[in-house]
């Protein structure tokens, strides 16, 4: 696969994403990440929610010191913040925390308390989507840990695709992985584990909008439970 060193226009980046998505389908996650690192260098970053730590560890093996972006919404479980801190202290990565423009207190003053209950889309837009958009501004490409088996909305995710909303190449090296693959990798490398995963939380987001998952439920059933909302907007 030809590297994209000089391909910085939107047209070239989109073409690169389309070609890479086809070329790397079925390739090992490490190979996909290695291509992205070579192609985009310092203009490539990883986004990790610290629900699990596979992506951060995998990236550290491919490119020690790689930048990992973490969204601190102000509503995270303490266990998730603790996992972020442990990853920063233990893995060979550079964790950069992204913050919303408004603190939770400022948001409450301007929009009223518990906006996440009344308008979760707006809350996610301000506390997740906008901070990530701002954080990704210096980069040409970014990687996420989303997988096809997580939900119906993600079943067509490609290993490399064009993020038209941000005009960036998006790399999803774990797209074809299953939950078993994640668990086997974590066990093989003795990865740090967010304690909530051991307490019935199959997918971990903000505290007010996340519950434990019942047996037989979809892994993301605990996110925005009781609402039609299934995505925060980052991957939409």
Image: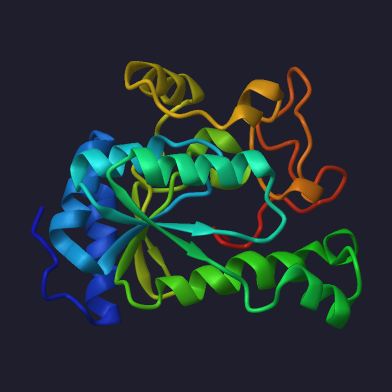
Seen in the picture, residue 91 relative to 163 is either above or below; the reply is above
| Residue 24 appears in the rendering | no
Q: Residue 137 appears at what percent x and percent y?
A: 40, 77
Asked if residue 135 is positioned above or below residue 170 in the image, the reply reads below
Q: Is residue 61 left or right of residue 225?
A: left
Residue pictured at 88% horizontal, 63% vertical: 114
Q: Residue at x 58, y 74 (%)?
A: 130
| Residue 194 appears left or right of 29 | right
Q: Position of residue 125 (x, y in %)?
A: 67, 70
Q: Is 94 situated left or right of 204 in this image?
A: left
Pick the front one: 33 or 98: 98
The image quarter containing residue 3 is bottom left
Q: How many marks?
A: 0
Q: Farthest left residue?
A: 2
Look at 50% across and 35% down and name the residue there. Answer: 52
Question: Vertical placement of 109 versus 97: above or below?
Answer: below
Which residue extends farthest front? 89
Could one spot residue 75 in this view of the protein? Answer: yes
Tell me where residue 56 appears, x and y as whole percent. 37, 43
Q: Position of residue 33 (x, y in %)?
A: 24, 47
109 relative position to 125: left or right: right
Instruction: Name the residue at 42% across, 41% down.
Output: 87
- Nearer to us in this view, 155 or 62: 62
Q: Work out which quarter of the rendered image holds the C terminus and state it.
A: bottom right
């Amino acid at each position: 696969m030809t590297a994209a060193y000089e391909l910085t226009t939107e047209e070239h980046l989109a073409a690169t994403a389309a070609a890479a998505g086809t070329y790397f389908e079925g390739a090992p996650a490490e190979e996909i990440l290695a291509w992205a690192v070579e192609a985009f260098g310092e203009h490539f970053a990883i986004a990790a929610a610290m629900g699990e730590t596979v992506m951060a560890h995998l990236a550290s093996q491919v490119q020690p010191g790689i930048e990992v972006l973490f969204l601190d919404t102000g509503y995270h479980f303490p266990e998730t913040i603790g996992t972020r801190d442990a990853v920063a202290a233990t893995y060979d990565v550079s964790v950069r925390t992204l913050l919303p423009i408004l603190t939770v207190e400022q948001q409450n003053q301007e929009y009223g308390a518990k906006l996440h209950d009344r308008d979760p889309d707006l809350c996610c837009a301000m506390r997740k989507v906008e901070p990530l958009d701002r954080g990704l501004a210096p980069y040409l490409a970014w990687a996420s840990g989303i997988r096809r088996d997580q939900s119906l909305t993600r079943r067509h995710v490609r290993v490399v695709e064009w993020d038209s909303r941000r005009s960036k190449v998006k790399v999803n090296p774990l797209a074809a992985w299953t939950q078993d693959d994640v668990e086997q990798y974590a066990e093989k490398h003795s990865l740090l584990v967010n304690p909530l995963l051991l307490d019935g939380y199959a997918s971990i987001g903000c505290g007010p909008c996340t519950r434990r998952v019942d047996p037989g439920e979809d892994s993301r059933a605990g996110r925005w439970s009781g609402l039609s909302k299934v995505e925060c907007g980052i991957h939409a």
